[in-house]
Structures are given as structure tokens and as C-alpha cells.
Amino acid sequence: MKILTFAEVCKRGDAKGKRVFIRADLNVPLNEQGQITEDTRVRASVPAVKMALEAGAAVMITSHLGRPVEGEFKPEYSLAPVARRLGELLGQAVPLQQNWVDGGFTVEPGQVLMLENCRLNKGEKKNDDTLAQKYAKLCDIFVHDAFGTAHRAEASTYGIAKYAPIACAGPLLAAEIDAISRALANPKRPLIAIVAGSKVSTKLTILQALASKVDGLIVGGGIANTFLLASGYPIGKSLAEPELLEEAKTVMATMKARGAEVPIPVDVVVADHFAADAKASVKDVKEVGAEDLILDIGPKTAQLLAEKLKAAGTIVWNGPVGVFEFDAFANGTRSLAMAIAESPAFSIAGGGDTLAAIAKYGIADRIGYISTGGGAFLEVLEGKTLPAFEILEARSQR
């Protein structure tokens, strides 16, 4: 995938004195007082802004925040607290510009201007062409640096990229593209994917897409229960989707035909009810009782899978393999997390629960790349071409 990066634009001197429009992902959580409670996304936007400032550009930056009704401003959807925090991080004032679509404001080289929540603009979500052209007139260079929105074609993510004189990927988006390409387009083998979650139905297309690519497909959570059932094992009262047994069998058959595998647990951790204080029992996978709930993989399975991960060349991780929020059922996820951290493989991880597990076990600095894209990360695993990648790749060929 060949996409022009903002770093390349700056290196050749094309940003000096120019108006740079950065689409960032600043959708941060706010408390009832309108204060930011977690500022990771604001801090993650700083490199693109600094890159533009160091190149001598005039900088505009915008993002969505929450789910406002287009055309109806409410204070709780304002980027004002984000502008204040970005100013603190940059060490300079970052004024907030309301009603910016039709211009009428100025920003000079060395300055940074926050453009109010783009989702307030009528036509933003539907990628209105007229709105996109108005956005494009505000800038000389458009920088897409919001991977979390890369799976959506909206006016501030896709439309503007069609019409801006230069459209390129910011450092965050460029890093995502590089990591995804390294993990899926040209991976070092063996390539092992961990896909876990409560339901096969929510990740069926991901499982089907990966079945033709990976050397090992580790399934966990409710998904694993469906695969256990498809393999003829009892699962008691465990969460599963019996109506998708044929789909699970097809995934396993696809893998087997390629000489790859979906390793089925040899032991599991069960309880008689779902609770943090439920008594955990380890059972052979063949011995699961009618009243049992499978809430984690067993220690033998965890060890076998950990050995596979330590021998991998590339690891893609999406989802914990057990109810890791409860300590009694966290061993499987912890064991695999530590194996990934200790593996020499290049690892890429994404998804909210996965990020929570990474934080819980303190291994963030030992994961090759952590994707914050959420839905965008999942769509990449499905094999979809994200709209942001598509338009930026097309623009790079002009």
C-alpha cells in the first residue's frame, strides 16, 4: 500500500507557510463537569501538530466528540476542554473556532487553531460533497491522523481528502498502516491470530478472513465454546451459538486443508454461576458437566498455546480468552499475554478488552504495536479496505 505521509510532505519542504488541516481522533471521555478524564488521544495527536509547526505551517485541527445532532450545538459536545488540554501539551494557546465551515477566520504559521466538533456540521456523517469541498478550501494540505475513524467515509475523513490540494497520512495513521501491513500483508511466519469474544456471529467474517491467511487461529471466550461444541465436546450451560456450528466447522476445515490449525482446548476452567466469587474448577475438556459454565481455558491449554505464541513470527491479538476481569478466571488471558510479551514475534493488538488486558498485566511496552482503532482494527482483520486507506492511496497516485 503506497500512501503519501505527512512526514514526506514536510521533508520536501511543502508545508512551510501552508495551511495544514489535521483530522485527529480527540473523542475523549468527559465527566459531568466537562473535564477530560483520560487524555491518551489528545497526547497522541501532539506529534502531528508538532510536525506541522516545525515545518513552518499554520495549523488547524478538528475531531468528532460524542454523538451530537448535526446543526444543534450543545456545550457537552464542545471541543473546548480538548483545546485547553492540547494547549497545555504544546505550551501555546490553542483557540477554539466556532462556525468555521465557510472560513472567515485566519491562522498564521506557528499558530494552532482548534475547529469545533466536526460532527456538528450538517452533512458530515453522510460525507456531503459540498461540505467536503468547503473543508478543502480551508487548507493547502489535509492530514488524516485518526485511525479510529478510518473505517468511516465522512466529510472530514474521506470527502476532504478528495479535494484538498495535498492529502496525506499523519504519523499515527502511517504507523497503523505500517503495523497492519507488517502483520497481515507480509508477515513473518508462523502467523498466529487470537480472536476471542462472546459470540461467533460478531466476528464470523474475521474468522473466515483469517482462516485463509494464518498458520494458527486461537479462539477464546464464547467463540471457543462454539468451536468446542462443533468439535463434539460438552459445554454445559456455557455461552455458545449452536446455530453457527457449521460455520465453525467450515473455518476449521479451511485451516486444516492449508495445514494450519484451530487448537481446541484440552482443559477448561468452569464454575456453576457467573460471578467474581464463583468457585473455579479445572476440568478436562471431555468432562464438562451439564451445569458447568466455561469461563477460561485451563492451565494445560494455556501452556500449550503459550509455547505456540513464543515460537511465532507474527501475532495478531483481538480479545481475552477468558473472563479476565475475575481473578479466578484470568489465568488463561494472563498466560497468553505474558507469552506474547516474551515472544520475539512482531505483535499487533487491538480492541477495547484487549487494551484493558494489556494495561492490567503491564505489558504495553512489550507489544509490537497497539492499535487504538477499535472498529477500524476489526474491519482490517475482516480483510476490508478502509475508506481512509482507499482515498489516500488514490490521491498518492495523482
Image (tube, helix red, strand yellow):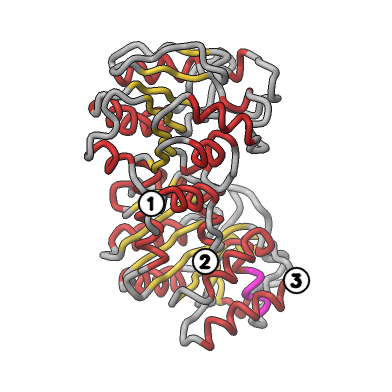
Q: Quadrant of residue 131?
A: top right
Q: Residues within 10 Å of mark 3 (few under 14, many from 20)?
A: few
Question: For the point 59% across and 16% down, which residue is it?
Answer: 32
Quadrant into which the N terminus falls? bottom left
Determine whether, in the image, residue 52 is placed left or right of residue 250. left
C-alpha separation, residue under disc 3 versus residue under disc 2 = 20 Å
Q: Tell which of 221 and 167 is nearer to you.
A: 167
Query: N-terminal of the two: label 1 or label 2?
Result: 1
Is residue 266 visible to the viewer in this orientation of the structure? no
Q: Is residue 261 above or below residue 366?
A: below
Whether tag 1 and tag 2 are in contact, CB under 8 A, the answer is no
Q: Residues within 10 Å of mark 2 (few under 14, many from 20)?
A: many
Q: Judging from the image, what secondary structure is the residue with disc 3 in?
A: helix
Task: Tell me where the magenta segment starts and ends, as one range.
Answer: 225-230
Q: Nearer the viewer, mark 1 or mark 2?
A: 1
Query: N-terminal of the two: label 3 or label 1?
Result: 1
Residue 261 percent coordinates (x, y): 49, 81
C-alpha separation, residue under disc 1 versus residue under disc 2 = 41 Å
Residue 43 percent coordinates (x, y): 36, 29
Determine whether, in the image, residue 272 is placed left or right of residue 243. left
- Say the numbered circle drawn on residue 297: 2
Q: Which residue is mark 3?
A: 242
Question: For the point 52% across and 76% down, which residue is it?
Answer: 212
Query: N-terminal of the two: label 3 or label 2?
Result: 3
Q: Which residue is mark 1?
A: 3
Q: Amino acid at mark 3?
A: Pro
Residue 206 percent coordinates (x, y): 58, 64
Q: Judging from the image, what secondary structure is the residue with disc 1 in?
A: loop
